[in-house]
Image (spheres, rainbow, N blue to C red):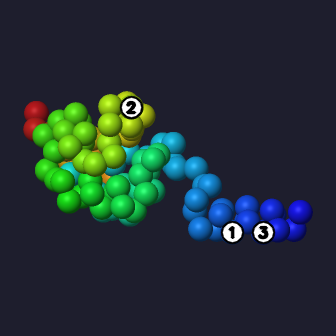
């Protein structure tokens, strides 16, 4: 029993069983591999690096060019990825909101 508990704790510490952030969203054209891995279910270091290497993406469907990203994976991550600066990447806005006009 102690061995099983030790294995579960070890896996949790290494990040293998920790859930991804359900609220994150990444700009796949600008996010680091670490940000992609932290946000997207099914993306480990290797797949995240492959995604970074395959840039730029002009459409979300272009992500299927990356080895290991099939239609099923794309549908799982579709609402967590974007391609432009209006997206939030790594928890911080990549572009400031436009200032309201003060002209009358």
Instruction: State how far apart marks 3 and 2 are (Cα).
Output: 34 Å
The image quarter in which residue 80 lies: top left
| Any part of residue 25 in sight | yes
- Label 2, residues with CA under 10 Å away: few <14, some 14-19, many ≥20: few
Residue 99 visible in the current orientation:
no
Horizontal and vertical percent position of residue 52:
24, 58
**Furthest-left residue in view?**
103
Q: Is there a contact, CB below 8 Å, between mark 3 and mark 1? A: yes
Where residue 6 is drawn, which disc sits there? 3
Q: Quadrant of residue 98?
A: top left
Residue 10: which numbered mark, if any?
Answer: 1
Say whether marks 2 and 1 touch (CB < 8 Å): no
- For the point 24% across and 42% down, the residue is 63
Percent across and percent down for residue 62 are 19, 39
Image quadrant where one finds the N terminus? bottom right
Residue that carries the numbered disc 2 in the rendered image: 72
Establish if 88 lies above or below 73.
Answer: below
Of labels 3 and 2, earlier in sequence is 3
Q: Nearer the viewer, residue 3 or 33?
A: 3
Disc on res. 80: none
Along the line of sight, the residue nearer the viewer: 74 or 67: 67
* Residue at point 52%, 50% (across, down): 20
Kind of element beneath mark 1: helix
Q: CA distance from mark 2 to mark 1?
A: 30 Å
SS for callout 3: helix
Q: Is residue 45 left or right of residue 53?
A: right
Q: Secondary structure at mark 2?
A: helix
Residue at (18%, 54%) from the top-left corner? 54
């Amino acid at each position: 029993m102690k061995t099983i508990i030790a294995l579960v704790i070890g896996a949790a510490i290494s990040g293998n069983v920790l859930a991804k952030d359900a609220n994150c969203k990444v700009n796949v054209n600008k996010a680091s591999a670490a940000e992609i891995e932290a946000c997207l279910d099914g993306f480990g270091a290797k797949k995240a690096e492959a995604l970074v290497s395959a840039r730029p993406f002009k459409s979300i469907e272009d992500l299927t060019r990356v080895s290991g990203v099939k239609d099923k994976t794309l549908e799982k991550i579709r609402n967590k990825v974007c391609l432009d600066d209006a997206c939030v990447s790594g928890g911080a806005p990549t572009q400031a909101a436009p200032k309201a006009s003060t002209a009358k």
